[in-house]
Amino acid sequence: MSSLAGKTALVTGATSGIGLAGARALAQDGAYVFLVGRREEALEEAVAGIGAGQASFIRADVTEQSDLDRVSSTIEATGRGLDIVFANAGTAEVAPLGHITWGTTSTRSTPTSAGSSSPCRLHSRCSMKARRSSCAVPPAT
Ligand SMILES: NC(=O)c1ccc[n+]([C@@H]2O[C@H](COP(=O)([O-])OP(=O)(O)OC[C@H]3O[C@@H](n4cnc5c(N)ncnc54)[C@H](OP(=O)(O)O)[C@@H]3O)[C@@H](O)[C@H]2O)c1
């Protein structure tokens, strides 16, 4: 059995680069993956490459609170809890889960200027099932 079989993952910035590679790797290891990014066509392409049975996308800008709320409610509506969050889009300060505030989110203006700690907050809200779970944020560049 795959090591991540039965697990659910969320990857932000999943339309290219490290995020797309991460989403593919998680799916390859058996996880069901929600891909988040702003470009719908690229999201469709990424999900098609992984396989619609193992991935789906939610188009969202992670700097927009309303988009994050929609990501959260969309995942909730599927009945899945999140086991893994790869908060890859953008830059962030580091803080433990449960101590992340909206103010922790970086507003640094880079080509990937998303507040990547935001999905960790999202993660906290989405983890409805009692699971041991983790949230990863890439180093800021
Ligand atoms: N490449 C490196 O050497 C390196 C090294 C250390 C750390 N990092 C960090 O790793 C992360 C990814 O790097 P990368 O090189 O893979 O970048 P990339 O190829 O430019 O990919 C960035 C991804 O983030 C998404 N994105 C950007 N802004 C977003 C927003 N506001 N909301 C939602 N999605 C957003 C983009 O998709 P859409 O355009 O579709 O939204 C894209 O999928 C970044 O946080 C970067 O700072 C990179």
Image: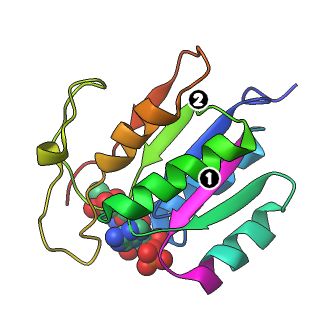
**Residue 61 horizontal side relative to residue 140, left or right:** right
Hey, which quadrant is residue 3 in on the image?
top right
Label at residue 74? 1
Residue 40 position in % (x across, y down): 59, 81
- Mark 2 CB in 8 Å range of ligand 1? no
Give the quarter of the figure containing the N terminus: top right
The answer, for residue 27, to whether it is visible in the render is yes
Name the residue beneath numbered marker 2: 83
What's drawn in magenta, residue-wise? 32-42
Residue 49 position in % (x across, y down): 77, 70
Give the quarter of the figure containing the C terminus: bottom left
**Residue 79 horizontal side relative to residue 116, left or right:** right
Establish if 56 lies above or below 119: below
Instruction: Name the residue rendered at 79%, 72% in the picture.
Output: 48
Residue toward you, 61 or 5: 61
Hey, which quadrant is residue 120 in on the image?
top left
Circles 2 and 1: CB distance less than 8 Å? no
Instruction: Name the residue rendered at 84%, 62% in the picture.
Output: 52
Label at residue 50? none
Ranked by sequence position, the earlier of labels 2 and 1 is 1
Instruction: Name the residue rendered at 25%, 25% in the picture.
Output: 96
The answer, for residue 138, to whether it is visible in the render is no
Number of callouts in the render?
Answer: 2
Residue 38 position in % (x across, y down): 47, 76
Q: Amino acid at mark 2?
A: Asp
CA distance separating discs 2 and 1: 16 Å
Residue 108 position in % (x across, y down): 11, 66
For mark 2, give the secondary structure: loop
Query: Badge 1: how crowded within 10 Å, few (<14), some, or many (20+)?
Result: some
